[in-house]
Amino acid sequence: MNLTDVPVLVTGGSGFVGSRIAAWLADEGATVLALVRRAGAHPGLESPRITQVEGDFTDPVTASRFCTGQVLVVHAAATISRDLTEALQVNVSGTGVLAAAARVAGCRRFIHVSTLSVYDFQTGAGSFDEDSPRRTLGKNYAHSPAASPFYGTTKAEGERALQEEMDRGLPATIFRLAAVLGVHPTSGWTVKVPAKVRDGQLALRGEGLDVLPWTHVDNVVHAIALSLDFPAAVGRAYNIVDGDVTWRDFADEMRTWFPGAPPLPVIPAAQVKPSDIFIRQCAGVRVRAELGYAPVRSYADGMAEAADWWKTEGLRP
């Protein structure tokens, strides 16, 4: 899609994924409205083609105002709140409100940023694809790696709220992301998790062989770009996962960034139930087959980028 002067709304504009999408859109010539909680000097939003606006997309009046006139809407905002009421308000109701506003406004494409955590990993399946069972409210799930017991469930319910608007005619595409590598102050996997490793606060379960599916933020942007040139992507969901790493290998590499880091605590294998494994292998076949997707950044790229950040920025007093 030629994005020159195309008006685009990006929610979660000050966040890791949202800001990278906004920056890419601006580089492509789009006119970007970045919805943020507080305007400021947010990394990635420096382009003169990006305008920051403050507002609450969960409010129907606000959502309608910001969606009006937009050709594309990219919904990258979410919360990992441990408060269920807040998680439902933002991830479920807010998604439905924004999607309804985009549909009424006649937006040509709605891109929804979701997560592999929507899947019900406790079914015990060996691998999960886009048609695998998703989490539902009312069922208890093992603690998720997002440090919130409600993130995966409310994101799954948010997808259902979005589907209602898709059934009414909203042309939407869903991207379910693996752990996203890349550096940003709000990055969980290469800023916040390494800080826990540095402080000896990340516990490994048993031998640390739980798998962590990964992607890179530049790969996410690449997949979205491909979908905008593929009309049949409307109505589809895509897993964006480029490989797996064990938690042991992931943590061991991060420990090399912190001289003197304490050993990581270990939860004995006898205390770990197979049903408690919170992430299993997820397939990324569909996006490759339908969009011709191939990753543009590797796991080594992402970890090297994070290591450099910690050496230059993260270790400063």
Image (cartoon, grey):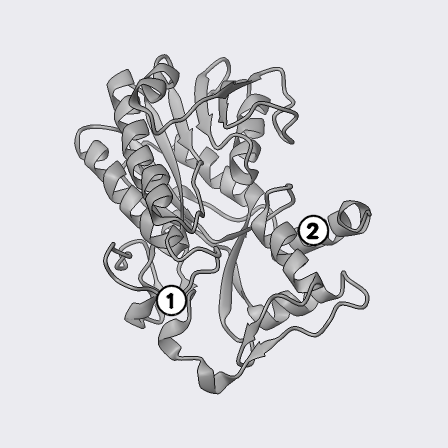
**What residue does disc 1 label?**
142
**43 relative to 114 in the view: left or right:** right
Residue at the disc numbered 2: 306
Q: Tell me the residue at 29%/43% (across/down).
A: 159
Give the residue type that dot 1 points to.
Ala
Screen quadrant of the N terminus? top left
Q: Quadrant of residue 259?
A: bottom right
Is there a contact, CB below 8 Å, between mark 2 and mark 1? no
Q: How far apart in space, not on screen, are marks 2 and 1 (Cα)?
A: 28 Å
Instruction: List x then y, in percent, for residue 204.
Output: 57, 73
Q: Secondary structure at mark 1?
A: loop
Label 1 CA crowd tier, 10 Å (few <14, some 14–19, many 20+) = some
- Based on the displayed image, in which of its 4 quarters is residue 313 positioned? top right
Task: Indicate the position of residue 312 as horizontal and vertical percent values.
Answer: 81, 46
At 74% across and 47% down in the image, what residue appears?
A: 309
Q: Is residue 157 above or below residue 11?
A: below
| Amino acid type, callout 2 | Ala
Outermost residue to the bottom: 270
Give the image location of residue 220, x and y in percent.
Answer: 50, 42
- Tell me: 170 left or right of 127: left
- In terms of sequence position, does the residue under pointer 2 or pointer 1 come before the other? 1
Residue 98 visible in rendering: yes
Which of the pair 141/170 is nearer the observer? 141
Q: Please tell me whether residue 33 is drawn above or below residue 310 in the rendered image.
A: above
Looking at the image, residue 266 lies above or below residue 68 = below
Q: Secondary structure at mark 2?
A: helix
Q: Is residue 103 above or below residue 151?
A: above
Instruction: Determine whether, in the image, residue 173 is placed left or right of residue 265.
Output: left
Q: Residues within 10 Å of mark 2 (few under 14, many from 20)?
A: many
Residue furthest to the left in view is: 168
